[in-house]
Image (cartoon, rainbow, N blue to C red):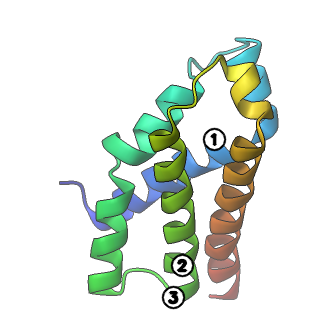
């Protein structure tokens, strides 16, 4: 298992990709690197590779993050789980245009905002 700071940094990096519509359009849809990525890979990173649900449980148990940050991560995790369970497929262009994906982008951005606000305030 990776250390707390690395784990959080990787989750936040993956969350940035999920929140960034321009990145998604450029990399996932138009395949304009240098990054090589897709919406499926973004979901796998957060849910499997970086195990967001386990991070949330550990963060809650050990008070690694604020209550606002924890709540925002929980909302994002729930949306990711609902999306994955829905079986919605399609190509990246269709996926990122869907209302469900737009909502995940919003939740990802909101989660990032809680970390930016916390970092800015001290």
The N terminus lies in which quarter of the figure?
A: bottom left
**Disc nearer the start of the sequence (2/1):** 1
Residue lying farthest to the top in this orientation? 31
Q: Quadrant of residue 115?
A: bottom right
- From the image, tell me which residue sits under label 2: 71
Q: Are marks 3 and 1 in contact (CB under 8 Å)?
A: no
Quick one: SS at disc 1? helix
**Disc nearer the start of the sequence (3/1):** 1
- From the image, tell me which residue sits under label 1: 17
Q: Residue 21 in the image: x percent, y percent?
A: 79, 38
Q: Within 10 Å of the Cα at label 2, are there few (<14), some (14-19), or many (20+) other Cα atoms?
A: some
- From the image, tell me which residue sits under label 3: 67
Quick one: SS at disc 2? helix
Q: Residue at x 58, y 72 (%)?
A: 72
Q: Is residue 13 above or below residue 32?
A: below
Instruction: Answer with left or right where residue 1 lies relative to residue 67.
Output: left
Residue lying farthest to the front in this orientation? 86
Q: Is residue 121 above or below residue 79?
A: below
Q: Residue 73 in the image: x percent, y percent?
A: 52, 68
Q: Are marks 2 and 3 in contact (CB under 8 Å)?
A: yes
Please state which of residues 43 and 37 is positioned toward the viewer in this rendering.
43
Q: CA distance from mark 2 to mark 3?
A: 6 Å
Q: CA distance from mark 3 to mark 1?
A: 23 Å
User: In this rendering, does residue 13 appear at all?
Assistant: no
User: In this rendering, does residue 64 appear at all?
Assistant: yes
Instruction: Answer with left or right where residue 88 lies relative to residue 116.
Output: left
Q: Residue at x 49, y 78 (%)?
A: 70
Quick one: SS at disc 3? helix
Q: Is residue 25 above or below residue 100?
A: above
Q: Quadrant of residue 31?
A: top right
């Amino acid at each position: 298992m990776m250390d707390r700071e690395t784990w959080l940094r990787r989750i936040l990096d993956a969350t940035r990709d999920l929140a960034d519509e321009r990145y998604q359009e450029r990399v996932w849809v138009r395949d304009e690197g240098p990054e090589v990525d897709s919406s499926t890979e973004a979901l796998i990173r957060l849910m499997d590779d970086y195990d967001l649900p386990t991070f949330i449980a550990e963060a809650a148990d050990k008070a690694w993050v604020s209550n606002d940050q924890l709540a925002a991560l929980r909302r994002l995790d729930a949306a990711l789980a609902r999306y994955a369970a829905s079986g919605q497929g399609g190509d990246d262009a269709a996926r990122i245009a869907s209302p469900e994906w737009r909502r995940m982008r919003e939740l990802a951005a909101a989660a990032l905002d809680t970390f930016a606000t916390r970092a800015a305030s001290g």
